[in-house]
Image (spheres, helix red, strand yellow):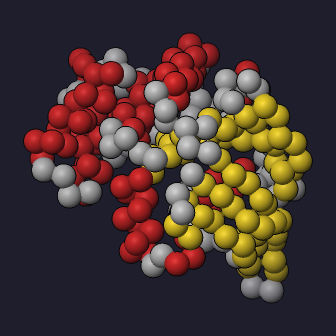
Amino acid sequence: MIETRNLIKTFRDGDKETPVLRGIDFRVAKGQYVSIMGRSGAGKSTFLYQMSLLDDPTGGEVIIDGHPAAHMSAAEKTRFRLSHFGYVFQDYALLPDLTAIENVLLPLLMQGMRKSEARALAEAALKRLGLSERLHSLPSHLSGGEQQRVSIARAVAHHPKILFADEPTANLDSESSRVIMNIFAEIHREGQTIIMITHEEQYAKMAEQTITLEDGRITTTLKNR
């Protein structure tokens, strides 16, 4: 489903260069659930941003479902992300002036779906995540756990090829975190490919495989089951 070959990312500030990813070779099969761990500054989020086409690498390749990212224009990458990827971030990234259902609906409409079809998918995703009574609530009226469930509904409503999650439980209490991780486990059992960054070892072990990054390189790969 996704492969990186000798992936390199270097940030430049004037004459100063800061290498963050130092030649990563990595593969994720369709339907696989992979967690990524590592200390702060190890390159985890940068790695996820390269794989998910949110940023361009300095060197190497990203190949997604047979599509070399380097061959895509900026507009093609945007369309590919919108149609084939789902994103869950630690800060929820919800639009504050839109209700829960409007936050889920908007990306579907941007894909060109008819409003009736998009609304049906948005409602189904939110109801599945236990938010039937919160469809018309603004983010400010939702708890952190509820906001993250809206974020997940938005990410999976269109049945993405890959779900990317960057520290999805970082701002949540332990109970809300367990709810979110159980949701991930459920959608993975249904065949969803998931790549997740986490700092919690107990949640990393819920994935099939855990990789650890250190100084921009994969240092360990552990099969959890």
The quarter of the image holding the C terminus is top right
Q: Furthest-bottom residue in view?
A: 15
Q: Is 17 displayed left or right of 209 in the figure?
A: right
Q: Quadrant of residue 124?
A: top left
- Along the viewing direction, whichever of 134 and 141 lies nearer the viewer: 134
Total numbered labels placed on residues in the image: 0
Q: Furthest-top residue in view?
A: 175
The structure residue drawn at horizontal position 34% and vertical position 17%, both measured from the top left corner, is 130
Q: Position of residue 171 (x, y in %)?
A: 58, 31
Q: Quadrant of residue 74?
A: bottom left
Q: Position of residue 182 (x, y in %)?
A: 54, 19
> From what the image shows, is residue 205 above or below residue 80?
above
Q: Position of residue 145 (x, y in %)?
A: 47, 24
Q: Is 217 displayed left or right of 95 in the figure?
A: right
The structure residue drawn at horizontal position 23% and vertical position 36%, both measured from the top left corner, is 121
Does the rendering let one see residue 168? yes
Q: Is 162 displayed left or right of 107 in the figure?
A: right
> From what the image shows, is residue 64 above or below residue 95?
below
> From what the image shows, is residue 154 above or below residue 183?
below
- Along the viewing direction, whichever of 145 and 32 lies nearer the viewer: 32
> From what the image shows, is residue 9 above or below residue 202?
below
Q: Position of residue 6 (x, y in %)?
A: 78, 67
The structure residue drawn at horizontal position 31% and vertical position 30%, both measured from the top left corner, is 125
Does the rendering let one see residue 138? no
Q: Quadrant of residue 221?
A: top right
The structure residue drawn at horizontal position 46% and vertical position 27%, both measured from the top left corner, is 190
